[in-house]
Amino acid sequence: MKQDERTPFVRALQRARASAYAPGEFVGQESFMGAREIRALAGRAGIAPGVSVLDLCCGVAGPGRLITRELGCTYLGLDLSASAIDIARERAADLPCRFEVSRIPPIPPGPFDVVLLFETMLAFREKQTLLREVSRALTTGGRFAFTMEEGMPLTEAERASMPDDDTVWLTPLREMRACLEQVGLVVRWQVDCSRSHRAVADSLMNAFAADATGIAAQIGRPALDDLLDLHRLWSAWLRQGRVRKFAIVAEKV
């Protein structure tokens, strides 16, 4: 079962995810970010009342709903998964959020004050194409706030060990910064979040294993095994320094 079929995964993993984060840190996200990191990145991006925000690959929009609720921005979330968008719409019923099912790229022309891309930069093989469209969608002075997995491309052996390896395209930080500059985006803020994300990966892995019987009953044992293998790999790579995680805000100049 693929996670594009979001409803069974959201239902099956809800209890384990809620238990894996520190109190107040789980807000419906499907990633290693905690609520405190989401708020910090949104703040650095200048999200505030009246600011127009485009959230790419929003999934069920846990972070997007948190940001809209607390900061009062104008919000549009995009994701390719129709089931994820259905969940996002249902959960945001009391919020001024809009959602659309869309492949990315292309990106709506906007203009937007802020573009978000949380925890999915890894999935884009052609990052320059994506960044060019992000820049076009931003106003001058607009901000692109994102997280990225930094490292050299996977070896063939590493790719063979990675579930859904066609969504894993690592990029060195120096190369990413150069790509940003080529499309007129200048890094204004950057923080290494490798340690905190490794801790969350470990905590999620342990929570999934503890609730293995209940989770497997809903999504099947093969899907659960892939999920556990994925978290073991990320934990090991983050511990070894094979991969580093960064949160970045870049401004269009």
Image (tube, rainbow, N blue to C red):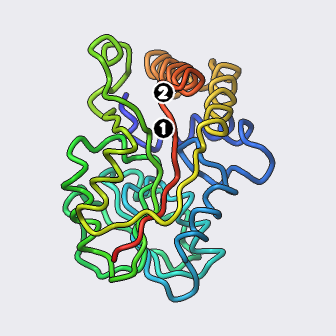
User: Which callout, 2 or 1, points at the residue further toward the start of the chain?
Assistant: 1
Residue 98: give its label.
none
Query: Element at badge 2?
Result: helix
Could you tell me residue 182's position as x and y percent?
23, 61
Query: Element at badge 1?
Result: helix
187 and 134: which is toward the camera: 187
Residue that extends furthest to the bottom in the rendered view of this protein = 50
Looking at the image, which residue is at 49% across and 66% down?
Answer: 188
Looking at the image, which residue is at 57% across and 50% down?
Answer: 29
Q: Residues within 10 Å of mark 1 (few under 14, many from 20)?
A: some
Marks 2 and 1 close (CB-CB < 8 Å): yes
Residue 190 shown left or right of residue 59 in the figure:
right
Could you tell me residue 163's position as x and y percent?
37, 22
Question: What amino acid is found at the position of numbered circle 2 in the picture?
Answer: Ile
Residue that extends furthest to the top in the rendered view of this protein = 157
Could you tell me residue 74's position as x and y percent?
47, 81
Q: Residues within 10 Å of mark 2 (few under 14, many from 20)?
A: some
Residue 88 shown left or right of residue 37 in the figure:
left
Could you tell me residue 252's position as x and y percent?
35, 74
Which residue is labeled 1 in the image? Answer: 8
Question: What amino acid is found at the position of numbered circle 1 in the picture?
Answer: Pro
Above or below, comparing residue 1 to residue 3 in the picture: above
Above or below, comparing residue 177 to residue 49 in the picture: above
Above or below, comparing residue 142 to residue 167 in the picture: below
* Viewport quadrant of the N terminus: top left
Which residue is labeled 2 in the image? Answer: 219
Looking at the image, which residue is at 56% across and 41% down?
Answer: 11
Looking at the image, which residue is at 51% across and 63% down?
Answer: 90
Residue 138 placement: quadrant: bottom left
Total labels: the figure holds 2
Q: Residues under labels 2 and 1: Cα distance? A: 6 Å
Above or below, comparing residue 8 to residue 63 in the picture: above
